Amino acid sequence: MTSERRATVMIVDDTPANLALLSDALDDEGYEVLVAPSGQSALRQLEITQPDIILLDAVMPGLDGFETCRRLKANRDTEDIPVIFMTALAGTEDIVRGFGEGAIDYVTKPIRVEEVLARIATHIARSRRLRRANSTVEALPRASLTVDVDGAITWLSERARDIVPTAFARGELPPAAAEWLSRCRQQDPSAARSTTLTLGERRVLFEYCGQVEDDEVLLFCEPADEMTGASLTGAFGLTPREAEVLRWVAAGKTNREIGVILGLSPRTVTKHLEHVFAKLGVETRTAAASRALAVLGSGVG
């Protein structure tokens, strides 16, 4: 165990002998231990406390492990808690079903304590790394999401959830976004690192930010239909197009990226920026961005 706070493990099993065996072993390793003799009991406890990981018996009377896992993964308060299934079911179909309900791993019964402890330590360490990374990204003023190789969304920041909830509701990128991302992954030279797509009634800018896990990439997204910079027009006497260019400069975009977003050539973007610099009385992008941010405030990004 590290100097971090003691990790908490919840054991859900209807067999008292299994609860006792695992509880004693985990306690000896320095974990905080919660026990639940049924799926219903586990869900009630999860309303008031959140463990770092859950050991979940697959076969229990009443609410079995599969349904218990499905319910906690459907709850935004508990969906990110790693679940390890404990099962005497050796069939591939049952194992696949467990993963389908959201489990990250499984161990077979009879329980081998050393194996369980090793898997718990590995998954808790990974979960904590991901939480730290997620917290860092959540703190950014950008809507963010991670996507796996199949185009499935593995994580959404709160800002991303709010942008186009219907587009992301199915848990996967819309087809047009998935096709663009596939070209980015393959380093297709024709694929810009950002693209603007129409999703429902909104236009959304996606920006490819690179790989964060072996099979996951990070994307930023923001509503392009809110990026017109109308407030900049009145503040500095800019044309609508000049205001749009300045707005994206303030968001940290390069001329090439701005060209992709607005459908302009880099040379045209440069010309607009020359006019913007003259009207703002500045000579650098940094100075122009600073003037724009003073007007736009926290709404940038």
Image: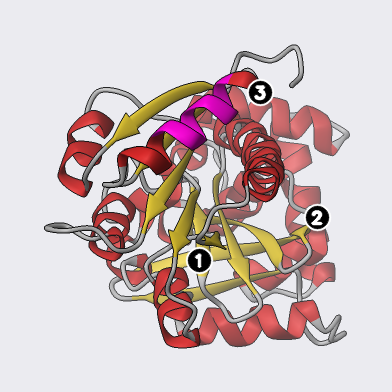
* Left or right of 7 in this view: 77: left
Q: Quadrant of residue 134?
A: top right
Tell me residue 15's x, y (percent): 31, 46
In the foreground, 26 or 294? 26
Q: Given this view, does label 2 or label 1 mark the residue nearer the observer?
A: 1
**Residue type beneath disc 3:** Glu
Looking at marks 3 and 2 on the same chain, the residue that comes earlier in the sequence is marked by 3
Of marks 2 and 1, which one's residue comes earlier in the chain? Answer: 1
Q: Which residue is mark 3?
A: 29
Label 1 element class = strand
Q: Main secondary structure of the magenta part?
A: helix
- Callout 2 touching callout 1 (CB < 8 Å): no
Q: Quadrant of the C terminus?
A: top right
Front of the two marks 3 and 1? 3
Magenta residues span 20-27
Determine the residue located farthest toward the front in the rendered image: 17
Residue placed under numbered mark 1 in the picture: 153
Q: Secondary structure at mark 3?
A: loop
User: Which residue is painted at 54% across and 57% down in the image?
Assistant: 221
**Per the image, is 32 magenta?**
no
Question: Is residue 95 placed above or below 26 in the rendered structure?
Answer: below
Q: Earlier in the sequence, mark 3 or mark 1?
A: 3
Q: Are marks 3 and 1 in contact (CB under 8 Å)?
A: no
Q: Calculate the distance from the C-alpha at mark 3 to the C-alpha at mark 1.
A: 35 Å
Residue at disc 2, secondary structure: loop
